[in-house]
């Protein structure tokens, strides 16, 4: 993917560029909002990472201007302003995701990958059936079948599985699940995610030789079809 990083701190910008290139992305970096707008308007990017606090035109204004100009490139805000009100302001401005500093690069890379897989136009709900390997989710009937056998999932388990499949092959972190499934923008310091994942895996992978749901140690979870 091609990624634009708008970040005024040179150390952070270099760290992001180096890391994203190592995982296979093409990266352009600019250090202020004005240059960011010029790049976003003149080049096709898959994802834009924007620092909230920038000299001149700040990150919020950059994204609002982009959206007003019809630029629908997915945006990840990266900032030290991590309060709930700050997150809401960023999302209301047109941002698609929000990650506070300091951050783990593995999580940032996972979020960038997830945004890059999202269809343009603001919605990925066009498909009514999702498939991975021999598992099929009917989003209208709210049913799941694997190998032709029905699997009974609770509503929250269904949400988790849907989110994992929409990001198949990518690492989904605990924080991403808390935000996208529970709408928590803080860590409740419980085993909430781990408990639900354990139950989901018992239902989805039970009695099957090859699992679909995998734990990525130190990073999160990943759904991928057996080889």
Image (tube, rainbow, N blue to C red):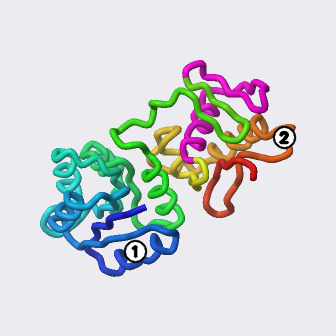
- Residue 168 placement, left or right of 180: right
Q: What is the x, y in percent for residue 74?
A: 35, 51
User: Reading the chain from its start, which is encountered first: label 2 or label 1?
Assistant: 1
Question: What is the crowding at mark 2: few (fewer than 14 residues within 10 Å), some, or many (at least 20)?
Answer: few
Q: Residue furthest top?
A: 141
Q: Is residue 202 above or below residue 11?
A: above
State the mark number for residue 208: 2
Magenta residue check for 5: no
Quarter residue 198 falls in = top right
Q: Secondary structure at mark 2?
A: loop
Q: Residue at x 75, y 53 (%)?
A: 227
Q: Which mark is residue 48?
A: none
- Of residues 220 and 145, the one nearer the viewer is 145
Q: As drawn, which residue projects farthest toward the left?
A: 56
**Separation of residues labelled 2 and 1 (CA atoms):** 41 Å
Q: Quadrant of residue 204?
A: top right
Boundaries of the magenta span: 140-167
Q: Which residue is mark 1?
A: 17
The image quarter in which residue 197 lies: top right
Can you say which quadrant of the picture contains the N terminus? bottom left
């Amino acid at each position: 993917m091609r990624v634009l990083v708008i970040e005024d701190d040179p150390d952070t910008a270099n760290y992001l560029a180096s890391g994203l290139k190592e995982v296979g992305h093409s990266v352009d970096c600019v250090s202020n909002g004005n240059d960011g707008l010029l790049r976003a308007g003149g080049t096709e990017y898959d994802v834009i990472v924007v620092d909230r606090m920038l000299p001149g035109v700040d990150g919020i204004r950059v994204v609002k201007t982009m959206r007003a100009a019809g630029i629908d490139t997915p945006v990840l805000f990266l900032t030290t302003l991590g309060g709930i009100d700050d997150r809401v302001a960023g999302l209301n401005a047109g941002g698609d995701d929000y990650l506070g500093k300091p951050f783990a690069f593995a999580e940032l890379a996972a979020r960038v990958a997830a945004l890059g897989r999202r269809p343009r136009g603001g919605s990925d709900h066009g498909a009514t059936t999702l498939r991975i390997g021999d598992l099929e989710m009917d989003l209208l009937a709210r049913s799941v079948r694997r190998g032709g056998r029905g699997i009974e999932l609770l509503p929250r388990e269904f949400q988790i599985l849907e989110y994992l499949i929409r990001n198949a092959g990518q690492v989904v972190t605990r924080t991403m699940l808390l935000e996208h499934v529970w709408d928590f923008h803080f860590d409740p310091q419980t085993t909430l995610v781990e408990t639900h994942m354990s139950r989901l895996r018992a239902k989805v992978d039970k009695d099957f030789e090859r699992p679909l749901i995998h734990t990525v140690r130190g990073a999160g979870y990943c759904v991928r079809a057996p080889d």
